[in-house]
Image: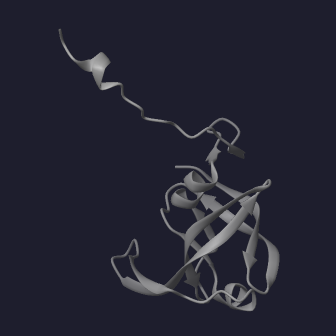
């Protein structure tokens, strides 16, 4: 698991805003402050149920949000974080955007997405 701060730009119908998120590969989902998302004109398209480490269940509104890092822009699933929730760039968004955390430097960096292409003809036995 890697944790680091990353600066991203969040885009919405009413503008864009730069913000810092905790990049954490231990989280799958991305959480961004609901107030910021609402100010940018984002509206939830559903909700997501989450289980905390102490086994409590939390439900948060969610939407697909355009997140930019170093000119790479991608839509990512995001939970509308409430007061007391962390602002986190999760593993799913990091993978969608093409980011990873270097284990030796703990810095967020662009990575090349793996392609799992299998030539079935090569796998056949004669």
Residue 112: percent from left, percent from top: 62, 38
Rendering quarter of residue 93: bottom right
Residue 5: percent from left, percent from top: 72, 59
The colouring scheme, among rainbow, by chain, secondary structure or one colour, is one colour
Rendering quarter of residue 117: top left
Q: How many marks?
A: 0
Rendering quarter of residue 103: top right
| Residue furthest to the top | 126
Residue 18: percent from left, percent from top: 82, 71
Residue 46: percent from left, percent from top: 45, 86
17 lies above or below 24: below
Q: Residue at x 61, y 66 (%)?
A: 75
The one of 117 and 42 positioned closer to us in this rendering? 117
Q: Residue at x 54, y 88 (%)?
A: 44
In the image, taking residue 110 as reference, residue 30 lies left or right, namely: left
Q: Residue at x 79, y 53 (%)?
A: 70
In the image, taking residue 21 as reference, residue 86 lies left or right, namely: left
68 lies above or below 62: above
| Residue furthest to the left | 126
Q: Residue at x 65, y 86 (%)?
A: 42
101 lies above or below 61: above
In the rendered image, the quadrant that contains the C terminus is top left
């Amino acid at each position: 698991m890697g944790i680091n701060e990353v600066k991203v730009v969040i885009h919405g119908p009413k503008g864009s805003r730069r913000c810092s998120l905790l990049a954490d590969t231990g989280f799958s989902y991305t959480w961004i402050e609901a107030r910021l998302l609402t100010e940018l004109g984002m509206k939830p398209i559903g909700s997501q149920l989450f289980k905390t480490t102490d086994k409590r269940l939390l439900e948060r509104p969610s939407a697909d949000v355009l997140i930019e890092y170093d000119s790479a822009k991608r839509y990512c699933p995001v939970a509308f974080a409430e007061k007391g929730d962390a602002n986190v760039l999760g593993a799913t968004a990091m993978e969608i955007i093409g980011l990873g955390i270097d284990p030796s430097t703990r810095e967020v960096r662009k990575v090349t997405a793996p392609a799992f292409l299998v030539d079935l003809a090569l796998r056949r036995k004669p």
